[in-house]
Every structure is written in C-alpha cells, then in structure tokens.
C-alpha cells in the first residue's frame, strides 16, 4: 500500500535519505531508502543508485544508495486535474518582473551580437508555504500521470519534489534513448498547437546540438519525427533519438549530454557562462538530472525462443533512467521555491518569456493546496 511507503518515508524524514518516485505512465510507486545519513558523491557515473545531479557538474552530484527498495501499486484518483490558474495577478511581481525582463533583453542583445545562439534563462519563485509534504506529493502523483513524479529527501542536502516531462537519457546495456524537448505553448481545450518559426528553430537547435555532440562518441544514432507532446497544461516539441554506445561509455555519453541546450544553450560554454554570470541566483539541482543509475536487471535476449526459461537466453544488463529536473520545487521549512525557465533566441520577446515562466510555474502551483487558488 502506498500509505505504508509514505509512513516509512515520513519516519525517515530529517533523519535518513529516501526517494519516492513513479515513472511516466506507470502504476507502480517506488521507494528507495538509504540506511545511513552519509552523503555519497558520484565520481564517474559507474556507480549504482539513485543519482541527483546539479545543473553545474562542478558542484557535487549526490548518489543515494538504494539499500532498501519497496514497490507498491499506486492508483491515480482524479487524474489530469484541469484547473486553470493565473498566478500572475496574485504574486508580488513588482520587483521580479522588471528584473527578469531586463535579463531577457540583455540575452537577446548578446544573441544579436552573435555571442551565442540560444540561452535558457530561469528564475526562482519564493513562497511561504506550510503543508504536509506527503499530501503535496499525493496530489502531484494524482495530477501528472505522464511525468516522472518524485519526492527526494536527504537530511544533509535538502528536499525536492517535481513532475518532469523530460528524459535526459535512458539506457539498457549499450542501447540508449534521449530526446530534444523545447518550445512551449499553453494547451487550450483540445486544440492542436500551432508552432511559430521561433519555437521550431529553438527546438531544432537542441536536436542538432545533441547529434553533433554525440556523433563521435556513439556507435549509432538515429532520430524519430518531431512531434507535439502535452505536459500538464503545456505543449512542447519533442524529437526522440536512439542509438548505441561502446561498452563502459555510458558516463562519457551522459557527461556529453548534460546540460543540453534545452536547459542551458548553445554554444554550451558561452551560454553557461552567461547563465552563471547573469541569472543572479544559484540553480543548484534545478535543470540538473535525477533517476536510477546503473541498476542491474535481467534482459531476455530473444522473446521468440521457445526455451525462454533457459538462462542461456537471459543476461544481466545495467539500466539507467535519468530525467531532467524541471517543473520542480525545493522545500525548506515553511518556504517553497519554484524554479522555472525558458529558451531565449534572437526572436524572443521578453514579455512572452515572462509569461512562459508564469505558465510553467502553474505546474507546481496546481499541486499546492487549494487555499492558493
Ligand atoms: C527550462 C524549462 O523547460 C525547458 C525549456 C523549454 C522551452 O524553452 O520551451 C521547454 C521544455 C524544457 O526543455 C523549465 O520548465 O523550467
């Protein structure tokens, strides 16, 4: 029962690390618990456990040891709650909005001077908020079936919760998939989104960058057709990419992928420097990545073979499933910090970029108690 998992996690709170998560479209809730409060750090991504990586890999990447793993069925009660909320009017944005508009304008100027092509800028929304975290997480699970819904806690690092639509990389043995996700539009009724040149260009930059970055490091790589996908109340453009890599190269692939221009920009170093110098706050784990790293699982080699139970046709492979830490919030005592951002290109308009962050913030607002609505 999910309640037992919640009770166990509640007992660990402020004492021992744990993570609760449900993968996209799955009915199973997983709880992973570490036996001590030690902080383990990832050195080269050959480690095994639940990884929690920051935006800037110069800071520590945390590894939670999955000493005890419990899996329970989770039935969604009131899926896809469609509450439409407009936070823009209720928040005190008199200081934050002009600051953000100026940040975007400065970025557009730099792009027009050819300093870089794209940069993803973001902000942190501070709220006073006190509520049982497990009630919040329950609401998150019920609201976003298609997302990776997590609740991560380490007594020495902090507490985070989120519902991310973006896979950084998923691998099984030497095969992997990744995606380029960018472009954002509000979903209105059942209407299909109409994408502008700006959004198509912004997403294409991400796809091209991933191809360019991976091409010399992988054995094969191909992409599917671009499609529109819905994440909560938002539409995004997505292209899936698949390929394979040489044994033991997973860490290299991962380091090459992160951070993609979906959360940083292109060219990478110039965009990253602009972010670090101008955003004026520390993203910490927002736009980092998280998930299962190098978990051993059994793979059936050929499903058509009659003799499936024969272990000769089964092999143990390592699988990883890592998601970009977006549509997330950090929970600190009676405060909630919601992190939101968006891609800026030469065609961006500062006011629309602000609106985009307001829309994205609704993904987490929707999960906070009704009192806020
Ligand atoms: C940066 C965020 O989202 C990323 C940026 C997007 C965009 O610029 O349109 C879309 C999806 C994500 O790759 C965020 O949600 O905070």
Image (cartoon, grey):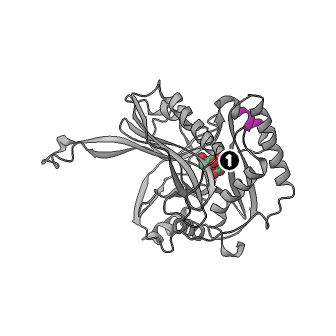
Residue 269 locus on image (x, y percent): 67, 29
From the viewer's perspective, tell me whether residue 63 is left or right of residue 307.
Answer: right
Residue at image x 70%, y 73%? 373
Which residue appears at 60% of the width and 51% of the height? 326
Q: How many marks?
A: 1
Is 191 rendered above or below residue 50? below
Q: Is residue 5 visible?
A: yes
Q: Is residue 13 left or right of residue 116?
A: left
Residue 259 in sight: no
Nearer to us in this view, 112 or 257 = 112
Disc 1 within 8 angstroms of ligand 1 (CB): yes
> Which residue in the structure is indicated by mark 1?
342
Secondary structure under the numbered disc 1 in the rendered image:
strand
Q: Which residues are magenta?
A: 272-277
At horizontal 35% and vertical 38% (from top left) the residue drawn is 173
Q: Choose between 128 and 366: the one closer to the eye.
A: 366
């Amino acid at each position: 029962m999910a309640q037992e998992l919640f009770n166990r996690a509640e007992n660990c709170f402020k004492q021992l690390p744990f993570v609760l998560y449900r993968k996209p479209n799955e009915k199973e809730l997983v709880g992973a618990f570490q036996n001590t409060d030690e902080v383990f750090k990832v050195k080269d991504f050959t480690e095994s456990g639940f990884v929690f990586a920051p935006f800037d890999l110069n800071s520590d990447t945390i590894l939670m040891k999955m000493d005890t793993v419990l899996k329970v069925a989770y039935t969604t009660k009131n899926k896809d709650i469609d509450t439409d909320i407009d936070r823009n009017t209720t928040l005190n944005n008199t200081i934050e909005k002009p600051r953000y508009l100026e940040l975007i304008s400065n970025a557009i100027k730099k792009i027009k001077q050819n300093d870089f092509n794209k940069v993803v800028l973001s902000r942190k929304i501070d709220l006073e908020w006190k509520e049982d975290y497990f009630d919040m997480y329950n609401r998150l699970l019920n609201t976003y079936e298609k997302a990776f819904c997590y609740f991560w806690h380490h007594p020495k690092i902090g507490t985070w919760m989120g519902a991310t639509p973006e896979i950084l990389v998923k691998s099984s043995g030497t095969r992997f998939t990744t995606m380029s996700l960018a472009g954002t539009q509000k979903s209105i009724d059942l209407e299909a989104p109409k994408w502008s040149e700006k959004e198509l260009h912004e997403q294409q930059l991400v796809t091209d960058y991933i191809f360019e970055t991976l091409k010399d490091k992988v054995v094969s790589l191909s992409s599917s057709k671009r499609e529109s996908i819905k994440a909560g109340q938002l539409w995004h453009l997505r292209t899936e990419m698949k390929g394979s890599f040489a044994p033991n190269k997973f860490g290299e692939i991962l380091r090459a992928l992160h951070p993609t221009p979906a959360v940083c920009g292109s060219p990478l170093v110039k965009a990253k420097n602009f972010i670090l110098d101008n955003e004026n706050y520390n993203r910490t784990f927002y736009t980092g990545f998280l998930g299962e790293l190098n978990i051993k699982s059994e793979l059936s080699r050929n499903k058509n073979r009659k003799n499936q139970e024969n272990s000769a046709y089964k092999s143990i492979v390592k699988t990883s499933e890592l998601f970009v830490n977006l549509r997330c919030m950090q929970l600190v005592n009676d405060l909630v910090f919601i992190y939101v951002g968006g891609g800026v290109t030469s065609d961006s308009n500062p006011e629309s970029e602000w609106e985009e962050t307001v829309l994205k913030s609704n993904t987490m607002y929707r999960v906070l108690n009704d009192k806020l609505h």
